[in-house]
Image (spheres, rainbow, N blue to C red):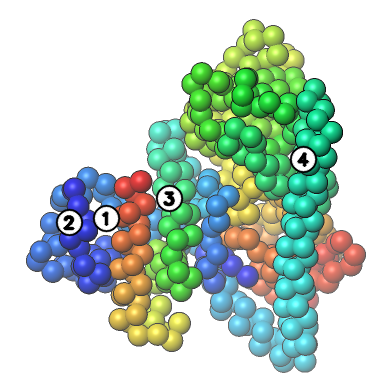
Amino acid sequence: MKDTGKYTERDWEELAAMFSDERETAGSDIENFSNEDDLHTEKQWREIGMRNSKGEINVDNAWNKLHNRLDNDGLLTRTVHIGSISRRSIFLRIAAAVVIIAGLGAAILYISNTDMLSRSIVFTAGNDQRNIEVNLPDGSKAWLNRNSEISYKPGLGKGSRSVKLTGEAFFDVVHNDSRPFIIDAGNAKVKDIGTSFNVITKNSNNEVEVFVSSGKVMLSDQAGAREVVLDPGYIGTMSQTGSNRSLNTNKNYLSWNTDVLIYTNEPLKNIFLDLKKIYNINIIADDPEILNLTLSTTLVKSPQDDIIINLCLPWHLKYYKEGNNYHLSRK
Amino acid sequence: MVTFSGRCIKVVDRHAREVALEPDLSTEDPAELLQYSELQAKIARIIERLPERCGQIFCMNRFEGLKYSEIAEKLSVSVKTVEANMGKALKEFRKTLAE
């Protein structure tokens, strides 16, 4: 189809209604839309719908139930309190972001003013700083997970493009055939043949681990003797003794970066582990059987307290916060 | 609080590119997985571009599977408004697919 400009607002409404099964047919002049549509808009539109909306709890209902219960228990001030915490935490996050950005800016200024060209530029994400965006001079981007560090020489992009990583980062690399983007990950080298991927310099087995989200990536040992080429969806690992390649089956692999967590019948104990890893939230089950309850839910950019509320709702669990720990219990 | 089943407004931001939706992991075909992650990235972009209310209606229909009439009731708007917003969302969706 060459031109969609001929379609009016009304046509789009008719088409949307038809693709969403609100109507059986659209008007006669747009009936042929899908036949002519080389982008398969209808198919993809329907596909979004099919992939979702299965087995999730209805949070709105659950929320209303909680609200009623709190109201009955005379605890409604507590809900107000929760709201204010969220807002404050958003403010704190923004404030923290400003401070970090200002800090990074100051660091760069300091480095350029001192003109230490032989020195590396270093970005470090501390224990409380997950998902720190780093704009590299060649236009590529990296997002650092907590306790991670990336460094590069000031001339990055002019000659070779190489960075050194410790910890975990997600990369979105501007591809350049003549200047490959190379990451020194300690025990291995990661060479971008494509665009975006995640690198962990030491996973739980002490290996370098790479997950490719789009494009192609080559993982090799420092000597270049062993190589693994990774396609999207694959995880590659490299250790002193060997390398491996497998298809990723963890939907939440990049959650630290995307702030999206998806669970289907997942035991709470696993969810607690993820929340600890991603958000540094400690959850303690005062009743051990809580750990084996299973939950299907999708958490998108939720503030901490909302996450805990989401976990508690299906079973009306109680929670209280003590320092950095949330305690969950049956009634 | 934002979840797909709850208030689905700021569903995805510029960072959300991979796991915003639920991929069908029964498939072992990387090409299909790739295609899916591309669709996810596109959806992220669409929602970013839509006005807030419009994105919310799009999410309620596509992610939560709510009918127009149900959305209208939940948001206290007319079905016509839902229709108009879904039209806008589809137009933006088509535009993003073409990029």
Q: Which three-letter amino acid code belongs to the residue tagged 3?
A: Lys
Which is in the foreground here, disc 1 or disc 4? Answer: 4
Q: Which residue is mark 2?
A: A33
Asked if labels 1 and 3 share a chain, the reply is no
Of B10 and A295, nearer the camera is B10
Question: Along the polypeptide, which appears first: circle 4 or circle 2?
Answer: 2
Q: Residues within 10 Å of mark 4 (few under 14, many from 20)?
A: some
Q: Which residue is mark 3?
A: B42
Measured as percent of width and height from the top left, residue A124 is found at 80, 40
Q: Is residue A21 visible?
A: no
Could you tell whether A10 is left or right of B86 in the image?
Answer: left
Question: Along the polypeptide, which appears first: circle 1 or circle 4?
Answer: 1
Q: Which mark is residue A108?
A: 4
Could you tell whether A221 is left or right of B98 in the image?
Answer: right
Alpha-carbon distance for marks 1 and 3? 15 Å
Asked if labels 4 and 2 share a chain, the reply is yes
Asked if labels 1 and 4 share a chain, the reply is yes
